[in-house]
Amino acid sequence: MTLVEVLAVVVILGLVASTLAVGFSGALGRGKHELAKTQIAVIVGKVESYRIERDAWPSDDLGLEALSDGHASPSDSYYLSQDKLFDPWGRPYVLIVPGPDGHPYEVLTFGADGAPGGDGPNADLSSVNLHKARSR
């Protein structure tokens, strides 16, 4: 094999690898978004359990910390371990009490970019919007 042939093979392998990397990163982003939806659904269930047991929503001051260590014990039906309070991008989920449009609360994450708004993997995910989507 000549040097030119070796270089051609290296370039082709590089192109194939970069194409695969781009494809996998898109799938990973979608996977994290789906995981966040599932985690929000679990948190909503715990917030609802908190409401049933405490006859009140978690306060804005405590937020989701009300469901975790220091404010709840593992024997409480609404207990969530500390690591479950973080989205797939490593940022804490946000609890807003009261929520928008007459909802008693909202659980949300600001997506991959951590900033309000956005599209695709950067889109915000909200328990209010997920509830509306399921109701259709």
Image (cartoon, grey):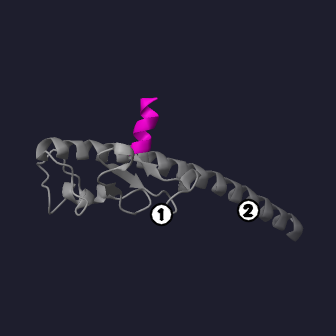
Q: Which residue is mark 1?
A: 114
Residue at (69, 59) in percent of width and height: 18
Q: Residue at x 43, y 33 (%)?
A: 134
Whole-percent x and y of residue 30? 54, 48
Query: Is any atom of residue 2 visible in this view?
Result: no
Q: Which residue is mark 2?
A: 14
Secondary element under disc 1, as helix, strand or loop, is loop
Of circles 2 and 1, the one toward us is: 1
80 left or right of 94?
left
Q: What are the residue bounds of the magenta stretch?
A: 128-136
Residue 38 spot, x, y in % from top left: 39, 43
Residue shown at 21%/57% (left/top)?
A: 59
Residue at the location (77% across, 64% down)? 10
Q: Residues within 10 Å of mark 1 (few under 14, many from 20)?
A: some
Which quadrant: the N terminus? Answer: bottom right
The amino acid type, in three-letter code, at marker 2 is Gly
Rendered location of residue 119, percent (x, y) = 58, 53
